[in-house]
Image: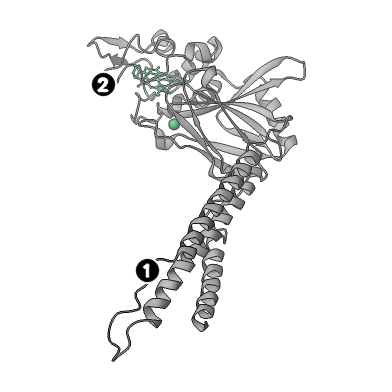
Amino acid sequence: MIHLLIVGVLVVISTLGIGLLLTGGWILPQQASQQAITVDWLFDLHFWFIAFFVSLICVIILYSLIVFRRKKGEKGDGVYMEGNQRLEIAWTIIPIGIVLWMAVIGGQTLADVERRDPDAITVDVVAAQWSWRFEYEVTTAEGVATKVVSDTLVLPRNQQVLLRLHSQDVIHSFFVPEFRVKQDILPGGEKYVRELRVTPNTNGNFSLMCAEICGQGHTTMVAQVQVVDGSEFESWLNEQAAECNLSDTECGQRWAQTFGCLGCHTTDGTTVIAPTWLGLFGHNVELADGSTVVADTNYLRTSIIDPNAQIVAGFNPGVMPQNFDEILSAEQIDQIVAFIESLSN
Ligand SMILES: [Cu+2]
């Protein structure tokens, strides 16, 4: 009886120790969404179960090893025991009960995380090798419906957002660790669009990371997420909805960033995935078919609209997205070309 009591006390102490350690808030990243609160509650519950069972097993083993070891002068083996039906029934029924109960609360938690708010705002997320683009539908003060495109995901605090996830090429995955929720993004058009709901509840800057290996640039497929007050979000959106009123070169730089060109092309002379833009304009470009062309305005424009028409020597066709013709306006293409030209002075 005394052994049982000691083991019981040790199990309680050990459970508390391990449980408090695991749920102490240093294992998981910062919590920054409504969904994260629910997810972490379930995490912590599991941590407590883990703490209890690890303690139960380890304490009994260690206690037996130390207290019941063969003493000096003792002879023979321990008592031989075989079968214990009651114990066997108990250790079958109890774990089944626990597992079923966990399935139920797991389901409840999932339902909670996916709960729809009819007032949710919608943001279209476009993943492409190797960049992110975010599209917002906006109605301007004049009542004109327009689209805002951004390379930063700006979200209002305490407002559910419905993220509609699109991929332009391969499978990617949307993951902001502070939000906890994660969703694979599939190519294939509207039919394969996946949805994710998140309600940010903390202002701050976070990182959106692609969580599905998607090629050479996967590790750099990171976007900024900015959670701000609702009013600040509104004014940001209105500001973005206005025409780009910078110079052509500056607008071009902005589009090159927003539309992911700079995920592959550099402007500093280094070549990682694609030819650098530094010093490109006005110079000779060797093509894969052995010919040479001068990179004039026309060549640049064609390279953007129809990338496979002329392939630069040493690079593969089909890497650069083929749909910029549809995504970019003629003006935006002109401005990007102006930006590339400005890098050769
Ligand atoms: Cu990716």
Tell which residue pokes out farthest to the bottom in this image.
73
The residue under label 1 is which amino acid type?
Glu
Q: Is residue 245 visible?
A: no
Which residue is located at x 39 percent, y 32 percent? Answer: 217
Q: Quadrant of residue 163?
A: top right
The answer to which of 310 and 317 lies nearer the viewer is 317
Which residue is located at x 30 percent, y 10 percent? Answer: 293
The mark total stands at 2
Decide which of tag 1 and tag 2 comes sooner along the chain.
1
Q: Which mark is residue 314?
A: 2
The answer to which of 257 and 252 lies nearer the viewer is 257
The answer to which of 231 and 8 lies nearer the viewer is 8
Whole-percent x and y of residue 214?
A: 39, 31
In this rendering, the answer to whether 337 lies above or below 107 is: above
Disc nearest the viewer among 1 and 2: 1
Whole-percent x and y of residue 171?
A: 44, 28
Whole-percent x and y of residue 134?
A: 57, 27
Tell which residue pokes out farthest to the left in this image.
290
Q: Which mark is residue 196?
A: none
Whole-percent x and y of residue 34?
A: 66, 44
The answer to which of 127 and 257 lies nearer the viewer is 127
In this rendering, the answer to whether 240 lies above or below 231 is: above
4 left or right of 311? right
Could you classify mark 2 by the number of other residues whose Cα lies within 10 Å: few (under 14), some (14-19), or many (20 or more)? few
Tell which residue pokes out farthest to the right in this image.
142
